[in-house]
Amino acid sequence: MAKTMKLIGKVTVGSGGAAYAEFTSIPGTYTDLLVTYSCRVDAAGYNNQASAVSFNGSTSNRSSRRLEGIGSSAASSTFASAMYSDITTGSSATANSFNSVEVYIPNYAGSTNKSYSSTHVVETNDATNNSIGCYAGLWSDTSAITSIRFTPTSGNYVQHSAFFLYGLTRA
Amino acid sequence: MSETPIAIEVNCETGEVVERPLTAEEIAQREADAAAAAAAEAERIAAEEAKAAAKASAIAKLAALGLTEEEAAALVGQ
C-alpha cells in the first residue's frame, strides 16, 4: 500500500482537441505510477473507441488482454501487438459523456519487463451502451519508463478530456 | 476541432506543457495504429457473430431431436 501519492503531471485537452496526451521526463524516484483520466473522442461511434498506451515512445513488444461488458454482452480480447487501457465514447454517444479510467503501473523504474493493469467505466446514461472493462498489459522491455502516451485508436481526444499522473511511494 | 492533429506533452520535471502539430512520421504511425485497431475490432465482432451462429445452429439441431427451445438453450448456455 502506498504511503504517499503525489500529482506529478496533468494534461487537460483544450478546444483544439488532442491526437495524444503524453507525460515526459517522468522521474524515477517513485515506487509505482497511477494514471487517472477521463476522455472522449470525436470519431464516430458509441462505445467502440479505445485508447492505446505506449511507454518511452515504443510501439514494439506490446501486448494486452481485455475483459469487457457492454450492455448485456460480455467479451474478451487478446492483442498480440498493442496495449489498450480503455473503451471510450465516440461522437454518437450521449452528449458530454466521458469514460473514467485508472491505470496502475508497478515498478516502472525497475529493470524487469513492464506491466500495467487498467479499469474503465463508461456511463452514457442510455439503455444499451454502458461499458465496463479491465485490462492487463505488458511491455516486454526492461527499460525504466520515462514517458507515457495515450492515443485514441481513431480521431482525437475532445475538449475537457483530462489525464493525471501520480507517483506513489511505499517507503 | 483543429484540422491538424495536435499533441499535448507535459514535462513532469519542469511542468512545461507543449502543444504541437504531429510530425509526418507520427501521423503515419497514428494511421497504422488506427488500421490495426479497426482490424482487431472487426476480428472481435466476427468471432462473436460466429459464436452466436454456432449456438443458434446447435439449438436448432437439438430442437430437431425433440428438445424444447428452453431445454436446448439451457444446454448451450443461453
Image (cartoon, grey):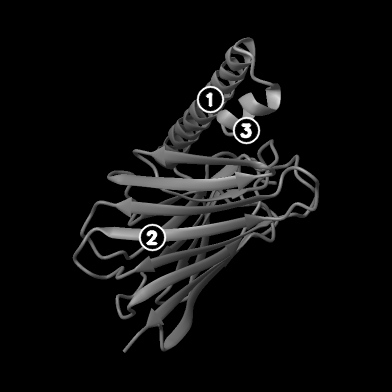
Q: CA distance from mark 3 to mark 2?
A: 34 Å
Mark on residue B78? 3
**Residue at 30% of width from left, 52% of height from top?**
A139
Pointer 1: residues within 10 angstroms few (<14), some, or many (20+)? Answer: few
Q: Position of residue A157 (x, y in %)?
A: 62, 51
Q: Report the amino acid beneath label 2.
A: Tyr
Distance of label 3 from label 1 (alpha carbons)? 12 Å
Q: Are marks 2 and 1 in contact (CB under 8 Å)?
A: no
Task: Please indicate, yes or no, whether residue B5 appears anywhere in the rendered image.
Answer: no
Q: Give the chain letter at badge 3.
A: B
Sequence-wise, the earlier of marks 3 and 1 is 1
Could you tell me which chain the residue with mark 2 belongs to?
A: A
The residue identified by callout 2 is A116
Q: Rate crowding at label 2 as few (under 14), some (14 to 19) or many (20 or more) other CA atoms within 10 Å.
A: many
Q: State the image coordinates of residue B10 (x, y, percent, origin top left).
A: 48, 67
**A119 and A32: which is toward the camera:** A119
SS at mark 2 in the image: strand
Asked if residue A142 is positioned above or below residue A168 in the image, the reply reads above
* Residue depth check, mark 3 versus mark 1: number of the one nearer the observer: 3
Give the side of residue A118 with respect to residue A122, left or right.
Answer: left
Q: What is the CA distance from the residue labelled 2 to the residue labelled 1?
A: 30 Å
Three-letter residue code for mark 1: Lys
Location of mark 1 (residue) = B51
